[in-house]
Image: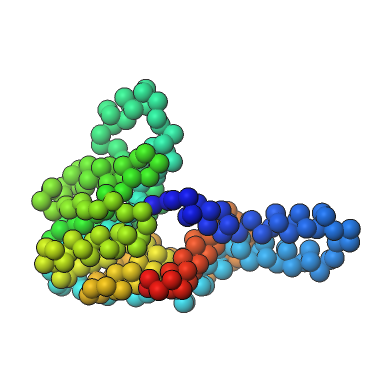
Amino acid sequence: MPSTPQATVQFLLNPLFPVFFLLLCFLLKRRRGRFGIFLLLVYLYVVSIPATSKLVMTHWWWVPDTVDFQKKYDAAVVLGGIVDYKWYARHTSSEDRAMLAQLTCYHHLGARADRILMGTAVIKRGVAKTLLLNDVSVRGVNETRLLVDFLHKQGITDEQIVVHGRPSNTLHEARNMQEYAAQHGMRELILITSAHHMRRAAAFFSKKGPKPALLSTGRDLTPLSREHFIPSSDGLEDTYLMLYELVGYGSYALLGKL
């Protein structure tokens, strides 16, 4: 996951970054035009309301699921980025580690926990035989080890879990999984990831090899309401995720990797 170039991109895509830049320009200018300030306020409003990302993602970006729950797939691929790394990174003292060792039934999953929960569900329902995971570590935290322990607690056995490869990004995840599937005769795959991430992830998997069946998580299907037009921190975060996916998809497309 996160690398130095990615961290730079994440910083630049922060919706508030242009605001500070424009405010600095206003301070340096002797004459501050009202029209410029008006445009800045409009920009702030648009990027801070949940309606912006909701309209873009729901009506344009999301791709439909193609999984057939009546079939028996060879494997389900669950993409990483599930564990709350920051929480684990904060608990690095010997006392905290000793405490965490006692709480083996507890797993601090992040906002994308629904990915592993969906993976668990398709295995338990018999929709897929095997769960494929990449060996993911971020900031010294081994996500995969935590997820395997979590899966054991849900009744998933070692025979139903495969860990393969050490990726640095989603493209590497896709290549690792396709390589393993080809080597082991796995033709029917389910790709599980968040709805906002699915278009880019599915394009990676379709670049080489057969297209996997798609199963998205985290779709916001609530209708638009007045709350979606009120600026909030959630709106800023949703706008950031939207920009990250749009820029990421466009960049990989220009590089010919999609």
Task: Provide residue 107's location: percent of width, then percent of height.
Answer: 31, 40
Is residue 132 shown left or right of residue 142?
left
Q: Is residue 13 above or below residue 258?
A: above
Task: Provide residue 221's location: percent of width, then percent of height.
Answer: 42, 68
Q: Is residue 199 or residue 203 the one in the foreground?
A: 203
Q: Is residue 151 visible?
A: yes
Q: Is residue 181 or residue 5 the one in the foreground?
A: 5
Q: Residue at x 35, y 40 (%)?
A: 141
Task: Provide residue 239's location: percent of width, then percent of height.
Answer: 54, 62
Type of colouring: rainbow
Image quadrant where one finds the C terminus: bottom left
Image-quadrant location for residue 94: top left
Q: Is residue 93 above or below residue 123?
A: above
Q: Is residue 242 visible?
A: no
Is residue 24 shown left or right of residue 84?
right
Task: Provide residue 161's location: percent of width, then percent of height.
Answer: 16, 52
Image-quadrant location for residue 78: bottom left
Q: Residue at x 85, y 58 (%)?
A: 29
Q: Please count the marks in the image.
A: 0
* Residue that lies at the very extreme toward the right in this rendered image: 30
Q: Residue at x 84, y 66 (%)?
A: 34
Q: Residue at x 41, y 36 (%)?
A: 89
* Residue that lies at the very extreme toward the top in this rendered image: 95
Is residue 248 shown left or right of residue 25?
left
Q: Is residue 190 above or below residue 161?
A: below
